[in-house]
Amino acid sequence: MKSNIQKVYSKLPKQELSAHKVDLNMVSDLNTAYNALIKIKDKMDDDLAKAKKSAIMGDSGINNFNKLFKNIEEAAKSLGTSVKDLNLQKLVGDVKNMEKEFNKVIEA
């Protein structure tokens, strides 16, 4: 003779139980994907903090460059020449572009 529990189990549709298994697997997959996203976000936050620190150091270097350039401008002027004669335009342009990039990272 079947016990009451066996009778109940025999009357439950087997398909419904497998659907619950699929749902549990899907939830498990969802949790795994969520945990992977947390790890990626944490790494991104760490990388962003490092990038900001580097950009701040770069910004300090920009300030130093600008002071040195200003000294060169004054020295050139006192010698009766121009900074343009020293062919520093590309160098100055590159530094201005770097400054923009540093500021983008700092403001992010």
Image (cartoon, rainbow, N blue to C red):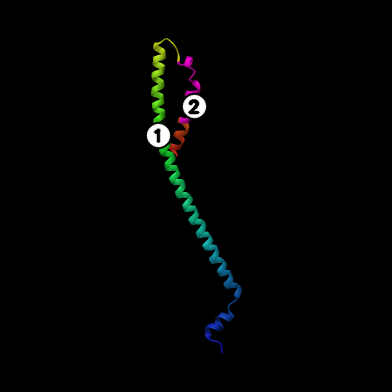
Q: Secondary structure at mark 2?
A: helix
User: Along the polypeptide, which appears first: circle 1 or circle 2?
Assistant: 1
Q: Is residue 88 magenta?
A: yes
Q: Is residue 23 magenta?
A: no
Per the rendering, the mark at residue 94 is 2
**Looking at the picture, does residue 32 appear above or below residue 7?**
above
Residue for point 44% across, 46% down: 45
Q: Which residue carries the number 1 mark?
A: 57
Q: Where does the magenta region start and end?
A: 83-98
Q: In terms of image quadrants, where is residue 13?
A: bottom right
**Looking at the picture, does residue 57 appear above or below residue 92?**
below
Front residue (pair 24, 74): 74
Alpha carbon distance from label 1 to label 2: 17 Å
**Looking at the picture, does residue 15 appear above or below residue 4?**
above
Q: On the rendered image, what quadrant is the N terminus found in? A: bottom right
Count of numbered badges drawn on the protein: 2
Whole-percent x and y of residue 42?
A: 45, 49
Residue for point 57% across, 67% down: 22
Whole-percent x and y of residue 44?
A: 47, 46
Residue for point 52% across, 63% down: 28
Kind of residue indicated by mark 2:
Asp
Whole-percent x and y of residue 108?
A: 45, 39
Neighbours of disc 2 within 10 Å: few (<14), some (14-19), many (20+): few
Whole-percent x and y of residue 40?
A: 48, 50
**Cβ–Cβ below 8 Å for labels 1 and 2?**
no
Kind of residue indicated by mark 1:
Met
Per the rendering, the mark at residue 11 is none
